[in-house]
Image (tube, rainbow, N blue to C red):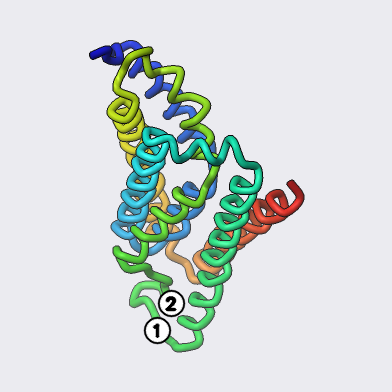
């Protein structure tokens, strides 16, 4: 059986790192979730990793090719992903406002921190990646270049998917830790509220932009 060379895998890993360093919906999602709870951000990062592996499986089975062959399918998935991002951003703003009105305060700052459960954060990360068609198109455009003729397409696609998932996960864990440490250092109610609103608004705006782009295509 034809296998992938180490040099090819290393080249793919470099592309994955470049992709991870470009801020996208996953980055802002992890930033938002990690503000008051680093472990929740790490759980969300793990969810994003699972989503990346699942995209790899879809490519291996040939199902993700639908995105490339059908503009309508791509448009619907794009709109669904945008709506989900909008939901995350708007719901985060609503939850933060309700928490403050309920008077649930943080002992060190007098501010009501908005927290996410590990399960909820993991699910949000997985859905964010699964509903991002750009991840699928990345696989479709790049993965075939690293699968040698006669190789095990499914097996190699899964290896590449796992590579992307690991690199993306490690990068997002760094984002989660930095976000948490920064908020711990800048634990002022006014600063906390501003960052919460900005990060939540970015998610909502990103979602709106994706929906508008999908509807226009």
- Quadrant position of residue 119: bottom left
Which residue does the image show at 65% across and 51% down from the upper left? Answer: 210
Q: Quadrant of residue 148?
A: top left
Q: On the picture, is 105 further left or further right than 215?
A: left
- In depth, the one of 88 and 162 nearer the eye is 162
Camera-side residue: 163 or 155?
Answer: 155
Give neighbour class at mark 1: few <14, some 14-19, many 20+ (Cα, 10 Å).
some
Q: Of 39 and 136, which appears nearest the observer?
A: 136
**Element under disc 2:** loop
Quarter residue 162 falls in: top left
Give me the residue at 40% from left, 21% from top. Answer: 12
Spot occupied by residue 215 in the image (x, y as percentages of width and height): 72, 54
The residue pinned by badge 1 equals: 104
In the rendered view, would you say 62 is above or below 82? above
**In the drawing, what numbered circle is on residue 159?**
none
Marks 1/2 in contact by CB < 8 Å: the verdict is: yes
Q: Position of residue 180 (x, y in %)?
A: 38, 55
* 105 or 49: nearer the viewer: 49
Does any portion of residue 198 appear in the rendered image? no
Q: Residue at x 32, y 68 (%)?
A: 117
Marks 1 and 2, Cα distance to the nearest angstrom?
A: 5 Å
Q: Residue at x 41, y 22 (%)?
A: 14
* Residue at the farthest bottom position: 102
Q: For the N terminus, which image quadrant?
A: top left
**From the viewer's perspective, is residue 198 above or below residue 135?**
below
Q: Name the side, left or right, on which 12 lies relative to 142.
A: left
Residue 16: x and y in percent read 43, 29
The residue labelled by disc 2 is: 112
The correct choice, above or below, for 53 with respect to 142 in the image is below
**Which residue in the rendered view is the most extreme toward the left?**
1
């Amino acid at each position: 059986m034809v296998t992938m060379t180490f040099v090819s895998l290393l080249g793919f890993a470099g592309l994955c790192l470049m992709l991870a360093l470009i801020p996208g919906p996953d980055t802002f999602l992890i930033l938002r979730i990690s503000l008051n709870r680093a472990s929740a951000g790490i759980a969300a990062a793990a969810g994003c990793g699972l989503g990346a592996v699942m995209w790899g499986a879809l490519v291996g089975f040939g199902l993700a090719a639908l995105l490339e062959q059908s503009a309508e399918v791509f448009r619907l998935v794009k709109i669904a992903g945008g709506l989900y991002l909008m939901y995350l951003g708007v719901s985060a703003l609503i939850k933060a406002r309700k928490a403050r009105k309920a008077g649930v305060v943080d002992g060190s700052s007098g501010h009501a921190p908005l927290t996410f459960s590990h399960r909820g954060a993991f699910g949000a990360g997985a859905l964010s990646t699964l509903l991002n068609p750009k991840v699928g198109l990345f696989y479709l455009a790049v993965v075939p270049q690293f699968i040698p003729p006669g190789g095990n397409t499914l097996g190699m696609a899964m290896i590449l998917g796992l590579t992307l998932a690991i690199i993306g996960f490690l990068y997002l864990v760094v984002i989660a830790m930095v976000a948490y440490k920064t908020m711990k250092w800048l634990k002022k109610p006014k600063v906390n509220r501003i960052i919460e609103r900005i990060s939540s608004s970015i998610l909502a705006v990103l979602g709106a932009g994706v929906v508008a782009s999908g509807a226009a295509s």
